[in-house]
Amino acid sequence: MTYNKAHIQELIIEHAAGTISEDDHNLLERAMKDDPEVETMFREMQQVLNSDKAHAFFHNIDENKAWDKVDSQMTGIRPINSQRIGFIKWLSVAALLCVAIAAFYYWSSESINNILVAKKSKKNPVVELQMANGRRIDLSDTSKRLINIASAHLKKGANGLSYQLSNNKTQEWSTLVIPPKLNYQIVLSDGTQVWLNSASNLRFPFAFVGTTREVYLNGEAFFKVAKNAVHPFIVHTGQTDVKVLGTQFNVNTYKTNIITTSLVEGSVNTYGKNNQKLLLHPGYQAVYAPAAGFLTQPFDADIELAWMHDMYYFHDTKLHDISEVLLRWFDVKVVFDDPAKADESFSGVIQKNRPIEVFIQNIQESAGVKTLFKDGVLHIK
């Protein structure tokens, strides 16, 4: 049997931390027994884990400070339940430790040159602001800097953008484009905060002029709209218009001809074709399809908004739908060598901050799916 290297490394780290489950412990022991290379990896990583350098690193980690830094970026969002917050907090710190140990391990190996060459050969995804005059501004780097343009002074953070209007307050439209793999945040001129999921774009004016505040969304975004009873905020999706005065809601347009609006707080009016209108209440979502109109149903915010914590929960979800998430989050194309597999349903979770090989390994072991992952294409056999 062939074992996934990234997954085995995580199991070794969990073994050292004393958090490994019984099933994973048995898998690790079986892997070491079956594969001499796994046993060698175990010994080498144990040496790294027990090194003075590793102990110093762990000693200096401030877990609460690290989490607070992440949590502060989500200010104002309705929190998910405390039990799951603790779980996600543990995952975030565990992911940090995994990255650090993996770095120690690779730094001490002779394969570092191959890793660097492989990274350089891959094209990095680019977050881009496309201006009305044709100018394109690359926002991908994590540096903090100021960018001056004719209509505004842009303030670029590590993973977000805000701006102050210049004296020239014209309704100049721009488009914020988020590629696969990444997500991004923007604060609009009225104070409205928008979190954009991977493979999404938001068209917006630097200054809201007139009686309404209007933007255009393609993809998925969470809106925390600044309250303004005189100037309604409208999100156009191409199929629906969502009209609010000030509230928190999520809009998902990923599926063709299906728009899902999920209300967390306040109230919204959503409009479809042929003058269809629906008033939505907190805890409910409106699912719109042109042929069927609006369908209202309750939703679990812990699941619906998990993407903001780089997690995607799926329950009885067809593999075809899961494959679309893999394309957006990992820029991996899925090819079904056996078309029947596309309609099989699975339950589980995808974590954006873990290698896709971990998901592949899990689905192979839990569902008996055979795969081949090569050159950014995942073949389902």
Image (cartoon, rainbow, N blue to C red):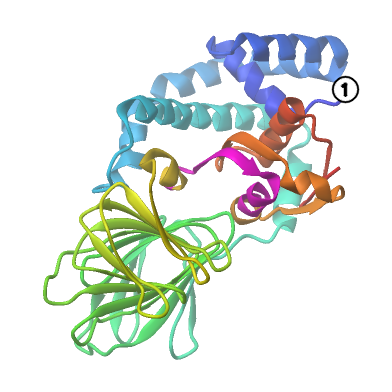
Q: Which residue: 30% across, 80% down?
A: 206
Vertical placement of 326 versus 346: above or below?
below
Q: Residue furthest left?
A: 230
Q: Could you tell whether 252 is left or right of 32 in the image? A: left
Say which of 105 and 354 sits in front.
354
- Residue 64 position, x and y percent, is 32, 28
| Magenta-colored stretch includes residue 313 | yes
The answer to whether residue 374 shows anywhere in this view is no
User: Which corner quadrant of the image does residue 350 belong to?
Assistant: top right
Say which of 295 and 326 sits in front.
295
Placement of the N terminus among the 4 image quadrants? top right
Q: Which residue: 39% across, 40% down?
A: 300
Say which of 70 and 65 sits in front.
70
Per the image, label 1 sits on a secondary structure element best described as: loop
| Magenta-colored stretch includes residue 304 | no
Q: Which segment did they paint magenta?
A: 308-326
Q: Which residue: 79% across, 29% down?
A: 368
User: Which corner quadrant of the image does residue 267 belong to?
Assistant: bottom left
Q: Could you tell whether 213 is left or right of 362 in the image? A: left
Placement of the C terminus among the 4 image quadrants? top right
Q: Could you tell whether 156 is left or right of 4 in the image? A: left
How many numbered markers are drawn? Answer: 1
Q: Which residue: 67% across, 36% down?
A: 359
Q: Residue furthest front?
A: 292
Q: Residues within 10 Å of mark 1 (few under 14, many from 20)?
A: few
Say which of 283 and 224 sits in front.
283
Vertical placement of 316 versus 12: above or below?
below
Q: Which residue is mark 1?
A: 1
- Residue 103 position, x and y percent, is 61, 32
The amino acid type of the residue labelled 1 equals Met
The answer to whether residue 320 shows anywhere in this view is yes
